[in-house]
Image (tube, rainbow, N blue to C red):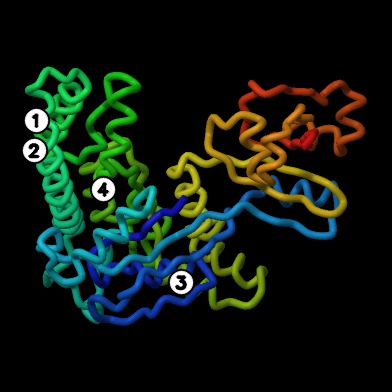
């Protein structure tokens, strides 16, 4: 599962990517600096794993990760191949969610591709390009489906009706994610269309350091604009985040954050938000060899969770042994949680909860 960072050139995408990952995307003051998408595998900050490490004292710790993709800046006309349009659109189509970075700071030394700072216009520029590309996809599909629908094919008629609803929304400059599937068949169909504007999105307002805590007038404009989109808005000073990553020690970073009035780096908030946007959650395995966070889809069953460790675990699944994270921490160890009756045995139907500490029994 991958989240792609998108935005106009020079809004801070590559600098943000550098803050999020150990990979170093080239960062320069001109458009199209990032020509190949850069992929960073980023640890998901989770204080729960620190607590489990403290209790279990394992030999090693493995955190959950999320893939972040830095994608070349998009410009007007991208849907028709302008700039690096076709490449951009291909790269974003391969991502599962979108992190849309908007420039919300004034700085005469950093050129804006459209001449002045206006996050509302910038958002609309990207939205329109993505909507135009989706409109092209929808109209091509409609051409094929209409013929089958005319013959009385019920499935084709249902698909045609959904395509027309999406087309109407796109023509009104609304994204495909505003279309609510009316049943499970529509849900499956909508996913099969692989529309760019159907992907979940979160907005990152890149502000100056003094606005990192409470935002500014540009952030207020963005919040007002997206209030009906069911999308999270995160305020981040990408420049300050870059400074934080340059500091050697944890103590120095904490002092820097305190001076800014922040409890943790904005990058940590963003990574957790991206993880959530991808509909991911975490369960833990905890033993003296290793404490590890495992990533699963929200709604995964116990055998599916076991399969993340090894496919044999899923195939030969017998049962899951489960202690909730809160119970594990309250009693301080697996043995004490068992003594207190907080140890559960769950079968194939069990839907894993975020934070479950689990062991699997299997037979292959």
Please, what secondary structure does the residue beneath circle 1 have?
helix
Q: Earlier in the sequence, mark 1 or mark 3?
A: 3
Q: Which residue is mark 4?
A: 196
Please give the label number shown on residue 18: 3
- Quarter location, residue 65: bottom right
Q: Residue at x 79, y 34 (%)?
A: 363
Indicate left or right for 13 with 325 as reference: left
Dot 4: within a 10 Å radius of its alpha carbon, few (fewer than 14), some, or many (20 or more) residues?
many
Task: Tell me the CA gap for discs 1 and 3.
Answer: 47 Å
Please, what secondary structure does the residue beneath circle 2 have?
helix
Task: Tell me the CA gap for discs 1 and 2.
Answer: 6 Å
Would you say residue 66 is visible in this rendering? Answer: yes
Q: Earlier in the sequence, mark 2 or mark 3?
A: 3
Please, what secondary structure does the residue beneath circle 3 have?
helix
Q: Which residue is mark 2?
A: 143
Q: Nearer the viewer, mark 1 or mark 4?
A: 1
Indicate left or right for 236 with 183 as reference: right
Q: Which residue is mark 1?
A: 146
Q: Position of residue 284 (x, y in %)?
A: 71, 42
Q: Position of residue 357 (x, y in %)?
A: 74, 37
Q: Nearer the viewer, mark 3 or mark 4?
A: 4
Q: Residue at x 35, y 54 (%)?
A: 94
Q: Residue at x 42, y 55 (%)?
A: 213
Q: Position of residue 120 (x, y in %)?
A: 17, 53
- Quarter location, residue 347: top right
Dot 1: within a 10 Å radius of its alpha carbon, few (fewer than 14), some, or many (20 or more) residues?
some
Dot 2: within a 10 Å radius of its alpha carbon, few (fewer than 14), some, or many (20 or more) residues?
few
Would you say residue 215 is visible in this rendering? Answer: no
Q: Earlier in the sequence, mark 4 or mark 2?
A: 2
In the rendered image, the vertical position of residue 224 relative to residue 316, given as above or below = below
- Quarter location, residue 348: top right
Q: Position of residue 136 (x, y in %)?
A: 12, 48
């Amino acid at each position: 599962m991958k989240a792609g960072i998108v935005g106009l050139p020079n809004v801070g995408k590559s600098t943000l990517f550098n803050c999020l990952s150990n990979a170093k995307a080239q960062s320069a003051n001109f458009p199209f600096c990032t020509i190949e998408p850069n992929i960073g595998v980023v640890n998901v900050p989770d204080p729960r794993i620190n607590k489990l490490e403290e209790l279990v004292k394992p030999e090693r710790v493995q955190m959950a990760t999320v893939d972040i993709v830095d994608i070349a800046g998009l410009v007007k006309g991208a849907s028709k191949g302008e700039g690096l349009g076709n490449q951009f659109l291909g790269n974003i189509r391969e991502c599962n969610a979108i992190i849309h970075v908007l420039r919300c700071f004034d700085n005469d030394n950093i050129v804006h591709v459209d001449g002045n700072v206006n996050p509302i216009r910038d958002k609309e520029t990207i939205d329109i390009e993505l909507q135009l590309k989706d409109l092209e996809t929808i109209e091509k599909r409609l051409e094929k489906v209409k013929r089958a629908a005319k013959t009385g094919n019920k499935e084709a008629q249902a698909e045609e009706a959904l395509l027309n609803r999406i087309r109407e929304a796109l023509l009104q400059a609304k994204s495909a994610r505003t279309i609510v599937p009316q049943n499970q068949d529509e849900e499956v169909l909508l996913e099969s269309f692989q529309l760019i504007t159907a992907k979940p999105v979160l907005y990152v307002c890149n502000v100056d350091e003094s606005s990192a805590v409470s935002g500014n007038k540009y952030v207020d404009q963005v919040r007002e604009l997206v209030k009906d989109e069911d999308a999270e808005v995160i305020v981040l000073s990408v420049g300050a985040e870059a400074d934080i990553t340059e500091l050697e020690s944890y103590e120095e970073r904490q002092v820097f954050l305190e001076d800014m009035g922040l409890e943790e780096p904005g990058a940590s908030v963003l990574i957790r938000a991206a993880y959530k946007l991808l509909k991911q959650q975490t369960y833990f395995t905890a033993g003296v060899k290793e404490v590890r966070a495992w990533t699963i889809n929200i709604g995964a069953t116990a055998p599916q969770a076991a399969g993340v460790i090894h496919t044999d675990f899923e195939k030969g699944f017998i049962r899951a042994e489960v202690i909730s994270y809160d119970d594990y921490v309250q009693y301080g160890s697996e043995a004490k949680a068992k003594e207190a009756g907080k140890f559960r045995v769950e079968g194939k139907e069990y839907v894993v909860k975020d934070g479950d500490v689990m062991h699997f029994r299997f037979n292959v």
